[in-house]
Amino acid sequence: MTKKLLQKTSITYLIFSVIVLCVSAPLFYFITERLYLDETDENLLLYKNEFLKYSLPTITISDIPAWNKSNRNIKIGSFTNIAKDTLFYSAYYDALDDEKETYRELNTPIRIEGNQYNYSARINLVDTEDLMNSIAILFLTITFSLLLGLFFITQRLSITLWRPFYKTLGLIEDFEIDKNKQPHFTETSIIEFNRLNQSIAQLIERNLIIYKSQREFIENAAHELQTPLAVFQAKIDTLIQRKDVTIEQSEILSSLNDNLYRINRLNKNLLLLSKLDNQSYGDKQTISLKQVIEKHTDFFNEQAKAKKIHIETNLLETLETKSNPVLAEILVNNLFLNAIRHNIINGKIIVTIASHSITFSNTSGANALNPNKLFKRFSKINPSEHGTGLGLSIVKKIADINHWVITYDYSENLHSFTVTC
Amino acid sequence: MKLLLIEDEHELANSIQRYLTGKDFVCELANNVKSAFDKISSYDYDCILLDLMLPDGSGFEIIKELKKQNKTEGVIIISAKETLESRLEGFNLGADDYLTKPFHLAELLVRIQALIRRKNFKGNNLVSYNEIDIDILAKTVKIKGNKIDITKKEIDLLLYLIGNENKVLAKSAIAEHLSGDMADMLDNHDFVYAHIKNLKKKLNEAGSSDYIKTVYGLGYKWQHD
């Protein structure tokens, strides 16, 4: 079970305190009782010694009833056949309190005028129950104070002491490597937190450098490919002009040409993706998505014609939003062409613009798609298709740049992509 | 027509040169900034094809030099650089067109033709081919003097075909030309067939000869038998 660090330490402290208190309470009780008993016994012996030294020489047998009458706790009784000092507990009924009181009693044989008598002194003991209660109350009070104290200290610590930690945590949580926003850690007065901040800052820095060089590598690689591709293209264009090309050769050339076209497309899309990563499309303007759609409707109709796809447009709103105009066009065009590409013969496409969203719905031979894989690079539904596998990641990237949300939905045999602005 | 091709990639330069030479162009070659400077100060050209990344400097320096010498040559930048910034810089300096590598030679050819037409523009912008007359500004096509009903895209296709007369045009090259910026997203070129078919039909119905030939497996060709 996961808990906050402070809760965990507090709970440990608490459990420890409770155990210590539980063990020490009875111990405390026994020691107190022991000490008390020792003190009582000592007092009884002291009384006895005083009695033997000061009172006994003056007492005669005739004085005994008077002595017993005037002394409640020291009595002289008939000889009980004991040889020496005997300490024991005894209980007497206390009529005033209407309960039995426990006493500690010392009996010792004495001689008065040659006759043996029994000296008996007693001291009322504190009630065991009372003692236990007092100790229980005392310890409960201590426990409660500890709990209360710990609770408030924890609260305070979590607010003051751990504040820099939670701040750091928040910064790391907000950090995204593909956004050009490096977290700035402030200096704290705690050595460990400073070390933590420094290590994280270094870690982030190193990762950013690696990420950046990786990104540049993709861009450079794609860029460097442009020139050899241009040569390749020019050579094929030259070769197909030859009069002596046989049918077999022209089939090979045609296939070369198609595949070169695919490489070009892939390369251009990779370049676009890395450019999107580098955020070189910052300038946002107010644009109307309706206009973007209308601008190329003829083109899309033309593309759809080959598959006899029926395009239905419900452009209810103008949907003005902020975006780089080029990117908005790329997004719309990709989604539109996607709807055509993955469509079936005699299928349909519904384009709907609502007040804050644009939706492309299309029929398709495929069942519901896996939304987790959909926007990943090179994840193709049908590997044999001639798509680059980059279209939807470009769409996603553009949506992210504009802080739009793109969702996929499948219902009633229609695959729908909705961009919410 | 005299062209200057400034390009350091020999293989590409040779292919461009060969393709253009067959189309009534004289194409001279420079493979660095220095030799380009020598050529532009000694000769006049109808059009300059300019690569931006040259071994001894940037192609932009050559455009600046042209300006300095008050030369009016049209400039088409052919570059692997595709950023908006380099495009804008090129146009701001005075380039007339920008073609990103890789491109089809046929595309380069029609861009050169269009540029030269614009440069030599004298009140009308006409392209004629036997019985066919195309008015580019008015977007009209006449066959044997009779106007035909034709879309903008079909005029574009017609110009592309006539411009590349006797050249085999791959379907993908035509598709790219017709779809412009969208070309990078297309994976299907079937729409080219529909356009060719429609254009062919319109030309034939108006009494034009059948110039559009299908080249098996590869594409199409505009050819006068």
Image (spheres, rainbow, N blue to C red):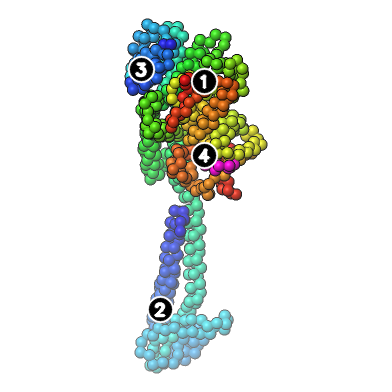
Q: Does the segment drawn in magenta span residue A13?
A: no
Q: Residue B222's x, y, as percent?
A: 48, 22
- Would residue B219 be visible to someone looking at this image? yes
**Does residue A76 sit above or below A9 in this rendering?**
below
Q: Amino acid at mark 1?
A: Leu
Same-chain check, marks 1 and 3: yes
* Mark linked to residue A218: none
Q: Does the segment drawn in magenta span residue A341?
A: yes
Could you tell me if the residues under marks 1 and 3 are in contact, i.e. CB atoms within 8 Å?
no
Q: Amino acid at mark 2?
A: Asp
- Residue occupying image coordinates x 38% and y 14%: B27
Question: Between residues A118 and A5, which one lies in front from this camera angle?
Answer: A5
Magenta segment, which residues? A339-348
- The image quadrant where one finds the N terminus of chain A is bottom left
Mark 3, Cα crowd under 10 Å, few <14 / some 14-19 / many 20+, is few
Q: Residue A9's x, y, as percent?
A: 43, 56
- Residue occupying image coordinates x 38% and y 39%: A207
Mark 1, Cα crowd under 10 Å, few <14 / some 14-19 / many 20+, is some
Residue pointed to by mark 3? B57
Residue pointed to by mark 1? B159
Residue pointed to by mark 4? A341
